[in-house]
Image (spheres, helix red, strand yellow):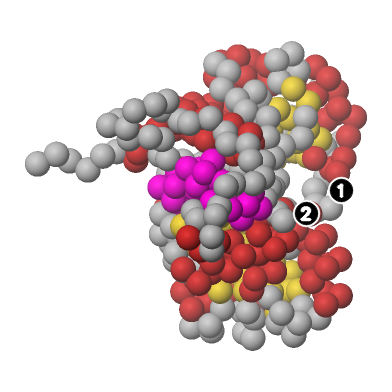
């Protein structure tokens, strides 16, 4: 009897044509707003480009294999976030939101949810503080590890606490990706991700998705996408799918390098703090080790002051100063330049790329030496 196929192999082939089907391994993007559809609309598989596209279908099949649940693709990560809030929350409901989740989500909650009568409860991620705020809530929104401070919460424990109170659980899995962490397996109702990050890994597209195991929720999300027009372009979806087979290789190298970088930074007396769940000193290390396959591609660290951080960034030779994370090119930024997070002016978010590990560590080391 053959053993079960390794997940890495499944990802390489996810959503591609079967080996017995003729034609290209992955068909090209289909550009069409209108399809020939005689008679009743229900008798036609394809009718109009805002409703469906075969390029989306193949990508969503790949996401199903990744997530372990049905997926809906959206034009951006924030469009995916908006779809979950929009299909779940109504005036008078309460949402428990991580106070250190992605800043744009917090801004959207304050600007759009609160004015329509949704109560927003902000609580920290660390220590599973969400559990104390669940009573009477409709939805709890967690992000683990958080961006940019990389705090960790126990998804399974939050799910258990939420179930006893009838609260739905949504997990922003952007930082971890479904390769490293599978919230649906841990009991979450929704998993959300910005696919502009590590899942596609080439810093060349904007995309997002939501996955769930509930058929009614999937139908509601697809209806939301159609009626709100939050549809992705076929070229972006095709690029995402084309990039997916290298995910195991990319993340394997990036996570190994991130661990090495974090260890090197932790040994330096001129670095005030290092945030990486893979370090035993990280307060969420045991939880991360239990619910993650590896510890991710981001290492954050504190240089204390803005001048030191800016000198460090200017002294890098191969690492690009840029926002976002998860790409094959290493990137770093002084995160406080965007505001919104409780971090120092010298806080650096470092996205580890696919360059040779020694080159990444050497570049960071020489830049830190110059920033002393």
* Relative vertical location of residue 119 with respect to residue 281 in this rendering, above or below: below
Q: Secondary structure at mark 2?
A: helix
Secondary structure of the residue carrying numbered label 1? loop
* Residue 202 vertical placement versus 195 (above, below): above
In front of the other: 130 or 185? 185
In this rendering, is residue 60 above or below 12?
below
Q: Residue 317 is drawn in which quadrant? A: top right
Q: Position of residue 49 (x, y in %)?
A: 64, 49
Magenta stretch, residue numbers: 46-67
Q: Residues within 10 Å of mark 2 (few under 14, many from 20)?
A: some
The correct choice, above or below, for 353 with respect to 103 in the image is above
Q: Which residue is label 1 attached to?
A: 339
- Inspect this view and state whether residue 286 appears: no
Q: Residue tagged by mark 2?
A: 103
Residue at the (85%, 23%) spot, across then down? 311
Q: Quadrant of the N terminus?
A: top left
Q: Where residue 312 appears, x then y in whole percent?
A: 80, 23
Q: Compare marks 1 and 2 and give the one earlier in the sequence.
A: 2
Q: Residue 368: percent from the left, percent from the top?
A: 75, 22
Is the residue under label 2 in contact with that under label 1 (CB below 8 Å)?
yes
């Amino acid at each position: 009897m053959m053993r079960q196929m390794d997940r890495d192999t499944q990802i390489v082939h996810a959503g591609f044509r079967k080996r017995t089907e003729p034609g290209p391994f992955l068909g090209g993007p289909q550009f069409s707003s209108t399809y020939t559809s005689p008679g009743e609309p229900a008798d036609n598989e394809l009718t109009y480009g805002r409703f469906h596209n075969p390029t989306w279908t193949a990508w969503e099949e790949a996401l199903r294999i990744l997530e372990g649940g049905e997926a809906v693709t959206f034009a951006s990560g924030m469009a995916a976030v908006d779809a979950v809030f929009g299909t779940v929350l109504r005036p008078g409901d309460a949402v428990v939101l991580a106070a250190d989740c992605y800043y744009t989500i917090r801004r959207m909650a304050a600007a759009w949810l609160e004015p329509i009568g949704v109560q927003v409860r902000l609580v920290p991620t660390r220590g599973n503080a969400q559990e104390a705020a669940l009573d009477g809530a409709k939805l709890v929104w967690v992000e683990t590890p958080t961006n940019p401070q990389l705090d960790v919460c126990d998804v399974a424990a939050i799910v258990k606490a939420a179930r006893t109170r009838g609260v739905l659980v949504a997990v922003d899995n952007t930082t971890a990706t479904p390769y490293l962490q599978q919230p649906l397996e841990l009991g979450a109702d929704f998993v959300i991700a910005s696919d502009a990050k590590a899942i596609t890994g080439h810093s060349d597209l904007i995309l997002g998705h939501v996955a769930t195991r509930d058929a009614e929720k999937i139908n509601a999300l697809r209806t939301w996408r159609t009626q709100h027009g939050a549809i992705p372009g076929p070229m972006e979806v095709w690029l995402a799918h084309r990039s997916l087979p290298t995910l195991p290789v990319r993340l394997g190298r990036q996570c190994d390098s991130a661990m090495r970088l974090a260890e090197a930074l932790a040994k330096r007396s001129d670095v005030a703090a290092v945030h990486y769940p893979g370090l035993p000193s990280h307060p969420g290390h045991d939880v991360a080790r239990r619910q993650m396959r590896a510890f991710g591609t981001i290492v954050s660290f504190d240089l204390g002051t803005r001048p030191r951080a800016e000198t460090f960034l200017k002294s890098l030779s191969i690492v690009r100063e840029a926002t976002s994370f998860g790409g094959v090119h290493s990137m770093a930024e002084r995160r406080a330049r965007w505001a919104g997070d409780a971090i120092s002016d010298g806080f650096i978010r470092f996205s580890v790329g696919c360059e040779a590990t020694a080159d990444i560590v050497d570049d960071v080391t020489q830049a830190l030496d110059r920033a002393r």
